[in-house]
Structures are given as C-alpha cells and as structure tokens.
Amino acid sequence: MTPADWLLLASIVLLILFSAFFSGSETALTAASRARMHTLEKQGDPRAAAIQRLLGKRDRLIGTLLIGNNLVNILASALATSFFLKMFGEAGVFIATACMTVIVVIFAEVMPKSWAIAKADQFSLSVAPFVLFFVLVFAPFARFVTWLVKSILKLFGVRLDDAHDMLSAHDELRGTFEVFHREGAVIKDDRDRLGGVLDLHELEVSDVMVHRTAMMSTDIDQPAEKVIAEILDSPYTRVPLWKDTSDNIVGVLHSKDVLRAIGQGVKPADIDLGKIASTPWFVPETTSLRDQLNAFLRKKAHIAIVVDEYGEVMGLVTLEDILEEIVGDIADEHDVEVSGVTSEPDGSVVVDGGVPIRDLNRALDWELPDDEATTVAGLVIHAAQMIPEEKQAFTFYGKRFVILKRQKNRITRVRIRNLVN
C-alpha cells in the first residue's frame, strides 16, 4: 500500500474514535447525576459547571452530538468504501459495508456507550470541556436543525415545547426511591418517609384531619373542674372549647396553661378557661399539607380547626398529623392505641371503616387509590356507587371487600382479601 493508503486508513481510525467519543458522551451526559454535578459545581469544579451548562440546553447538546456522530460515521464509511473499491474493485462496496457495520457497532456504539453507562459521572467529567467546545462550534447548525425539526413536527400536531408528557421532578424522585427499594438499597420505611415528603404538595388538610365525629372538644360553659377532668382523662394536650353548639369553637385550651394556673395558687373551680385559652385558628379544608406545615412552623402553632367553604367545622388538624404523613404513626406513652387493622389467619385483614387509605397502603404496601376517598369506608362507597348492606361483597382494585358491620349509613368494619399474588 502507498503512503496515501495508510493516511486514508489512519483517517478512518481517527473518525471511528470521534464517533466513539460522540456516542459515549451522549450516553454519559444524559445519565449523569445532576445532583452530584450540582454539588461538584458548588465545590468549584469547572467540569461540573460545564456539564450543568450543557444539560441546561439539552436539545442543543443532543443535536450537536447527533450531528457530529453522523458526520464522522458517514465520512468514515465514504472513505472506507473508497479504500476497498481501490483494493478489491466493485466487491469493495460490500466489503466496506460489512467491515464498517461491525467496526461502528462494536467500537463506536456498544463499547463506548457501555463504558459511559457504567461510569456516567466520571465519563461526563472527562469529556465535558471537549463537548462544550463542539457545542459552541456547531451551535448555528444545531439551532437550525432544531428549528427545522420542531417546524416539521408541528405540522403533525406535535409540539416539543409542551412538557406535559415528561415526568415531573417529584415523579422522577419517587421512581428512583421505588427502584432503590426494589434493589434493596432503601428499606420500606425509608421509602415511605421520602415518598411522604413528596406527597405533601398533593394532599390537602382534609385528607389527614381528625373528622369532627372523632374530634374531642368540650363545652366551655361547664364547670371548670369538670373540663379539667375531661382534659386529664384524654390523651391530648390541646382541646378545642365550644360554646352553645359544637360548631362554635371559641378557644383551644392547653393542659400546660391549666397546670400553670393551678401552680399559681388558683383553685380549679375558679380558673377562667376563656381567659387562659388561646384563640382558635381556622384553616380551609382545601389547604395543601405543604402550605399548612409551613404555616404551623411560621406561626409556631400545633393545632388548627378545619372548616369548609361555608365556615362549618369539619375537624381539626395538628402538626403531628402532618408529620405522621412523613414518618408514620407517632405514639407516646399517653396515646390511646386504636385497633384499626387486624390480620386474620386466612390472610385477609379486618379494617375499621374510618382507617385512612394512605395508612392502610403504607402498612400493607398496597396501592389502593385515595384520589376520590380518604377512608376505607369512603373508598367502598365510591367504588360501589351505593351504601352497601352487611355481608355484601365487592371486588375492585384487585381486592375482595366484604362488609362486616354497618351502623345506619356508616360502614364501620370491612374484611379485605388481596386477590393479587
């Protein structure tokens, strides 16, 4: 072979290396951890800053890498065809096609991409400065190609600017936790806590509040010693006070304020409950848990009365109720244990109708929907589109629901059997 032939082969090899560079860079940069890159950027790593800059214009980055990859592949194939035509005549076309297919697939696609996936962060940091250079060089052509592609797709009703089909950051994080849990890197409790934080913006106060039928409150017009006795008999430190009707909440009494008054020498019968009680805080039932949590922290408060759009009392919500959505049930030595879920020997569970769906899902790792109902009883009524009778059974959401007990129009106990293995 002549020196020109050797130069031609060297050019083909160089182009294959460039193809491997573009292929590996595309895979590595799209798989790199943005969280780690952000941390490295904060620590002053210029390569991480370059990656963040590249990922900020992802469409331009992908366009540049695809343009570069196709350009070198086509040029390498053309040079290889020219070389083999010279060496083998017309048969050189088929030889060039076979050789370039094997070489490109193995050395310019599979090998660099496998390496990039296995070492995404390290690979990205290594190639970032060079990729940034090519992005700047190909920027005008990449912008033109991007505009042309968007214009053509727009003719078919596809708009790349719409992000409705893309996963939100919350969904991506939730999916990551699920994958880690499945692989054993995250235990179920940790997954539930992390998921609970992400759910705060999706849930409303009405989803976690103590309903008015289960809310403990007391009449302020009763003798003070009787009210104090009720507070001492309850597991709660803060108790709403009502006047005339249970809907008219006029204050919230803290047991510590009662003890402080007694400690100052005031007899229980002489304590002015209205004077030591704090002003009730009313919040709409549609308030998101994230906003309510921030409000609790901002006001340094622990309890709020939940009202509907007409101002009617719906229940109460506490700081502990919201925290339990993150960390699970919080119990202390004065809490009254409520038997809400009981496992049966046959594998079924007996559930009180008032048990929240989210608590049941968390306890049993189920996925019952909680969009249209908050409690198990509400879910059964919503799915059945009726108020079931006792012993009536339904099958939905992969479960068998049997109504065990009903009081008037309330479902108080349900047996649930999982039909999905």
Image: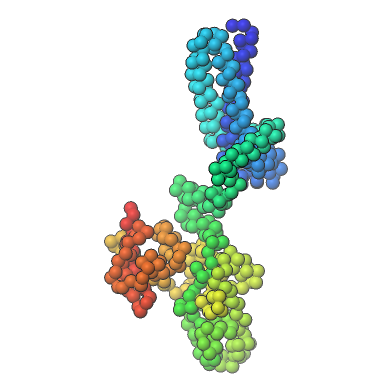
From the viewer's perspective, is residue 22 above or below residue 6?
below
Q: Residue furthest front?
A: 155
* Residue pictured at 45% horizontal, 67% vertical: 374
* Residue pictured at 68% horizontal, 44% vertical: 41
Q: Please say whether residue 21 is visible from this viewpoint.
A: no
Quarter of the image containing the N terminus? top right
Q: Residue 327: x percent and y percent?
A: 51, 62
Res. 126 image quadrant: top right
The colour style of the image is rainbow
Left or right of 415, for residue 355: right
From the viewer's perspective, is residue 137 above or below residue 280?
above
Q: Please say whether residue 386 is visible from this viewpoint.
A: yes
From the viewer's perspective, is residue 303 above or below residue 265?
above
Q: Residue furthest top?
A: 2
> Which of 408 and 129 lies nearest the eye of the viewer?
408
Q: Residue 20: x percent and y percent?
A: 58, 27
* Residue pictured at 41% horizontal, 60% vertical: 368
> Which of 35 and 23 lies nearest the eye of the viewer?
23
From the viewer's perspective, is residue 73 above or below residue 372?
above
Q: Residue 212: x percent and y percent?
A: 48, 78
Count of all numbered marks drawn on residues in the image? 0
Q: Residue 70: x percent and y percent?
A: 59, 28
> Which of 124 and 149 lies nearest the eye of the viewer?
149
* Residue pictured at 61% horizontal, 10% vertical: 5
> Which of 189 and 166 lies nearest the eye of the viewer?
166
